[in-house]
């Protein structure tokens, strides 16, 4: 999926673009895949800031200084620098894209179930408000393709940790189905984001086998992940 206007681009690579995770046994291949993929968008790798991802809630503010770098132990990135592109990798986790069209600031967060429990979405909003004077009601947020509740079925060890989000949990014969995007949308609303400004992709990474990597579906020995990206165009 990709969305592009004169001022903003954001999207998610697809399976045929190849593996995009820059660490692990696919690292060399991923670097080539990224170069090819972003070349089609006229984006050089030196203009990308990549988040290292640890299923935490650390959000970094980045600018020219971090261009071309990978930030370890970071799950969220924010910038107001034009032509600087933020990336994370996902293989079922939620890519959450933020855009403040008034202050011209963007953000990108990675959230699996741990990140949802940690409420990284609220940290993103707080950083936008605190550092860029964003008004929460101006923020446009998109939750991209991810493992939707049809396939995010968990056992009590995980489900019990979502006790405060009962309305997003359904009991099925296989276990508890959790609607992570629904929870994130509620968290965003609690932070002042307008419900009408939140878009949730209907694509489930598990279901769309031709298009998306899914760790839960494929259970690869080494994670095969897509790249989510966003950038302000100038
Ligand atoms: Zn599904």
Image (tube, rainbow, N blue to C red):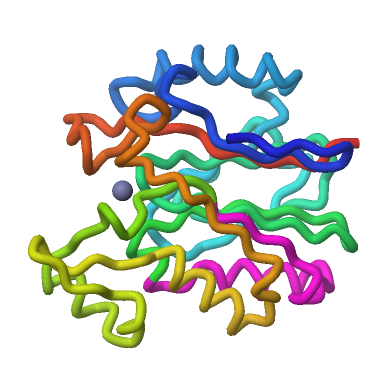
Q: Is residue 74 visible?
A: no
Looking at the rendered image, the quarter that the C terminus falls into is top right
Q: Is residue 24 left or right of residue 9?
A: left
Determine the image quadrant of residue 205: top left
Nearer-the-camera pick, 66 or 102: 102
- Closer to the camera, 110 or 164? 164
Q: Using the rendered view, name the quadrant where residue 81 is placed.
A: top right
Q: Residue at x 13, y 72 (%)?
A: 157
Report the side of 171 relative to 202 (left or right).
left
Rendered position, 208 above or below 58: above
Q: Is residue 175 above or below residue 225?
A: below
Q: Residue at x 45, y 45 (%)?
A: 203
Mark yes or no: residue 107 visible: yes
Who's the residue at 50% across and 68% down the image?
Answer: 120
The region drawn magenta spans 117-143
Viewer-closest of 32 and 116: 116
Q: Is residue 30 above or below residue 159?
A: above
Specify the farthest residue to the bottom: 164
Locate the N terminus by quadrant: top right
On the picture, is 145 further left or further right than 167? Answer: right
Q: Nearer the viewer, residue 201 or 46?
A: 201
Q: Position of residue 175 (x, y in %)?
A: 12, 66
User: Does residue 125 show up magenta in the picture?
Assistant: yes
Q: Residue at x 8, y 65 (%)?
A: 173
Measuring from the top left, give residue 104's x and y in whole percent. Answer: 86, 55
Residue 150 located left or right of residue 119: left
The percent coordinates of residue 41 (x first, y second) are 72, 21
Dominant secondary structure of the residues highlighted in magenta in the image: helix
Residue 126: in magenta span: yes
Rendered view: 27 above or below 83: above
């Amino acid at each position: 999926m990709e969305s592009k206007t004169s001022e903003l681009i954001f999207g998610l690579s697809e399976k045929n673009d190849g593996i995009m995770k820059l660490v692990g046994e696919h690292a060399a291949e991923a670097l080539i895949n990224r170069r090819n993929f972003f070349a089609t968008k006229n984006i050089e790798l030196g203009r990308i800031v990549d988040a290292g991802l640890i299923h935490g809630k650390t959000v970094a503010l980045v600018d020219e200084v971090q261009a071309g770098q990978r930030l370890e132990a970071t799950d969220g990135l924010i910038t107001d620098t034009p032509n600087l592109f933020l990336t994370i990798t996902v293989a079922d986790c939620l890519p959450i894209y933020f855009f403040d069209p008034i202050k011209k600031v963007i953000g990108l967060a990675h959230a699996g179930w741990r990140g949802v429990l940690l409420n990284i979405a609220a940290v993103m909003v707080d950083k936008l408000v605190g550092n860029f004077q964003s008004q929460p009601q101006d923020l446009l947020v998109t939750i991209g393709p991810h493992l939707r509740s049809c396939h995010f079925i968990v056992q009590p060890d995980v489900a019990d940790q979502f006790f405060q989000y009962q309305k997003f949990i359904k009991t099925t014969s296989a276990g508890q189905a959790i609607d992570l995007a629904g929870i994130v949308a509620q968290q965003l609303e609690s932070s002042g984001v307008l419900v009408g400004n939140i878009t949730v992709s209907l694509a489930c990474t598990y279901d769309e086998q031709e298009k998306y990597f899914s760790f839960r579906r494929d259970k690869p020995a080494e994670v095969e992940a897509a790249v989510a990206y966003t950038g302000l165009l100038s």
